[in-house]
């Protein structure tokens, strides 16, 4: 990477779905893996902190911007290879837009990613937060993650075990400055049936595919339609989609905490007879609650506004930027929302999108 390819004072807001935050003092675009190596050397030679930017759909850029080098991962491409077990491996470069990967897998009749349609962002980000929706997570199919280890500058291939995946969690997320994802490989099932584990999706598919077995393409399209109704498909015509998706993770609490939430909801008259607090038992005995439900029942209505920022009018879990705002305003709104949920239910919501941050290489 020649010095000429390093740009100065590049606004980052247009590179994020929220459209918030300041500029990068130094900015590099990497369209090859070699560019990534070179950008790391550039930063370390000059003692610059380096932060990695993917698709910008899950990143919060500070209003003061970033004083080091922002490395935009724009490598692109996919290939498949047969596996001995009859599955097909799909290898996608980190910068490949995720919706493209899902569309390609579905068009190739490869099952395993169809419920993850319409999620904005880059492929390299998917293992970091273990992207999931409608009953599927990338960790269900990830074979390996090829990454650059910033400690040694060596390329490493991480197994799923080494990635330590959890709900919206991984080792890559917990140790954010250690690895830069270069390529992700998925094991997919040729001709496999779509996954209909999520009740809302299964119900919608009963209407779409009333006769015969649902196809991967039908599930893909139905997921997009469900997401669109929730403002979760990027669309310049939909102001609710100017968000980072879910702003909080769904809280996973102990059985007794879930009972306490149920009791508080009942005492507050929030449950009609026969209704229950939406909850999903986890394999470890804990219970996942629906943050969107808690937010609404804590008294924050969809469409709630605080000047230029607000809660989506379609889904209480998404915070939206209406234009002309700052990240500080959005974070103040997030504190208000989380504070109200904690006061009502004693449950602390955790932020889902990541703050753009870097370390000196
Ligand atoms: N709900 C409300 N009010 C709302 C939103 C939701 O009461 O404003 C209730 C719903 O009625 C339902 C429950 O909450 O009973 C769950 O809602 P939904 O099915 O919309 O899913 P979610 O739990 O809010 C999660 C993921 C989404 C993913 C969907 C579908 C997290 C943090 N979010 O949302 O992922 O698309 O399930 O699988 O796990 C993302 O991570 O950015 C994201 C969009």
Image (cartoon, helix red, strand yellow):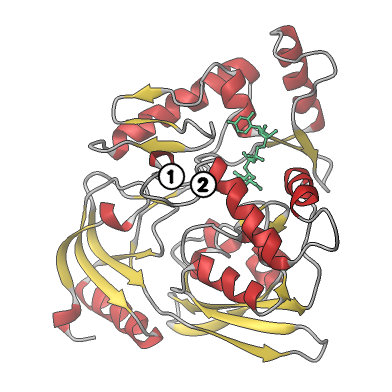
Percent across and percent down for residue 230 are 55, 40
* First along the sequence among labels 2 and 1: 2
At 50% across and 26% down in the image, what residue appears?
A: 302
Residue 219 figure quarter: bottom right
Do tag 2 and tag 1 residues touch (Cβ < 8 Å)?
A: yes
Q: Is residue 308 above or below residue 158?
A: above
Q: Position of residue 118 (x, y in %)?
A: 54, 58
Picture quadrant where residue 252 is located: top right
Quadrant observed for ligand 1 in the rendered image: top right
Q: Which residue is mark 2?
A: 232
User: What residue is shown at x 64% (from left), y 28% (from top)?
Assistant: 293
Asked whether, in this view, residue 280 is left or right of residue 148, the answer is right
Between the residue at mark 2 and the residue at mark 1, the CA separation in whole angstroms equals 6 Å
Image location (x, y in percent) of residue 332: 36, 28
Quadrant of the rendered image containing residue 1: bottom left
Q: Which mark is residue 241?
A: 1
Label 2 CB less than 8 angstroms from ligand 1: yes
């Amino acid at each position: 990477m020649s010095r000429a390819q390093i740009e100065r004072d590049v606004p980052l807001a247009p590179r994020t779905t929220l459209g918030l935050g300041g500029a990068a003092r130094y900015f590099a675009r990497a369209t090859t893996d070699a560019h990534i190596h070179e950008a790391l050397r550039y930063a370390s030679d000059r003692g610059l902190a380096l932060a990695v930017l993917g698709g910008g759909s899950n990143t919060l850029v500070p209003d003061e911007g970033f004083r080091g080098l922002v490395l935009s991962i724009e490598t692109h491409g996919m290939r498949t290879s047969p596996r001995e077990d009859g599955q097909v491996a799909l290898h996608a470069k980190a910068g490949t837009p995720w919706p493209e990967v899902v569309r390609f897998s579905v068009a190739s009749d490869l099952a395993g990613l169809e419920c993850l349609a319409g999620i904005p962002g880059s492929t390299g980000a998917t293992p970091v937060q273990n992207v999931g929706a409608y009953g599927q997570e990338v960790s269900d199919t990830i074979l390996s993650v090829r990454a650059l280890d910033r400690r040694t500058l060596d390329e490493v291939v991480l197994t799923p075990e080494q990635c330590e995946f959890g709900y919206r969690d991984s080792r890559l997320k917990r140790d954010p400055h250690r690895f830069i994802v270069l390529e992700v490989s998925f094991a997919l099932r040729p001709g496999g049936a779509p996954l209909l584990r999520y009740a809302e999706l299964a119900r919608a598919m009963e209407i779409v595919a009333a006769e015969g077995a649902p196809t991967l393409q039908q599930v893909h399209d139905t997921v997009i339609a469900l997401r669109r109704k929730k403002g979760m498909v990027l669309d310049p015509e939909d102001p609710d989609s100017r968000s980072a998706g879910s702003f909080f993770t769904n809280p996973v609490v102990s059985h007794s905490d879930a009972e306490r939430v149920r009791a508080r909801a009942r005492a507050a008259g929030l449950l009609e007879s026969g209704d229950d607090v939406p909850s999903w038992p986890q394999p470890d005995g804990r219970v996942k609650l629906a943050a969107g439900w808690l937010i609404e029942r804590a008294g924050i209505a969809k469409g709630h506004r605080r000047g230029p920022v607000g809660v989506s009018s379609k889904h209480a879990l998404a915070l939206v930027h209406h234009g002309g705002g700052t990240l500080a305003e959005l974070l103040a709104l997030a504190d208000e929302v989380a504070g109200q949920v904690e006061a009502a239910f004693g449950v602390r919501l955790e932020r889902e999108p990541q703050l753009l941050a870097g370390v000196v290489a």
